[in-house]
Amino acid sequence: MTNLSMFKKSDQDEARKLLDAYDYNMKNAINHVLQGNFDKASVYHQNMAHTLDQLQQLKNSKKMEDEAWLLLKQLQGEQQQKEFLHRIRGKL
């Protein structure tokens, strides 16, 4: 099973459904290839590619959120440091 922590918690159900859809399409694509139905297999492969694009978008969304959170924390830390130094200088 895929580690869903690469997706935002609010996107994990959707990611799970997309992963299930990917699995479904892969199994059907393989079956059609084995039967020589390459045109039908191609449709399933296209569906797989589309699903992977959607999963990548969800993953990118999580990455952007994580980067924004980190930047916010860095800015808060810098602000706290400035306030601390200002208080220290005021006591000297």
Image (tube, helix red, strand yellow):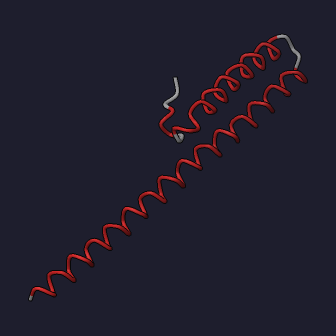
* Residue nearest the viewer, comparing 92 with 44: 92
**Viewed as shown, does residue 10 lie left or right of 28?**
left
Q: Residue furthest top?
A: 35
Q: Is residue 53 left or right of residue 36?
A: left
- Work out whether residue 86 or residue 49 is closer to the camera in this orientation and state it: 86
Q: Position of residue 2 (x, y in %)?
A: 52, 28
User: In terms of image quadrants, where is residue 90?
Assistant: bottom left
- The image shows residue 60, relative to residue 55, as above or below, that is below
Quadrant, the C terminus = bottom left
Q: Is residue 50 rendered to the left or right of residue 19?
A: right
- Residue visible at 81% across and 17% down? 33
The total number of labels drawn is 0
Residue 91 in the image: above or below residue 79:
below
Q: Is residue 82 above or below residue 73?
A: below
User: Residue 71: x and y, percent?
Assistant: 43, 64
State the image coordinates of residue 72 (x, y, percent, origin top left). Answer: 42, 63
The quadrant in which residue 37 appears is top right
Q: Position of residue 20 (x, y in %)?
A: 65, 22
Q: Name the residue located 87 percent from the left edge and 14 percent from the top edge.
A: 36
Q: Residue at x 83, y 22 (%)?
A: 41
Q: Residue at x 70, y 24 (%)?
A: 21
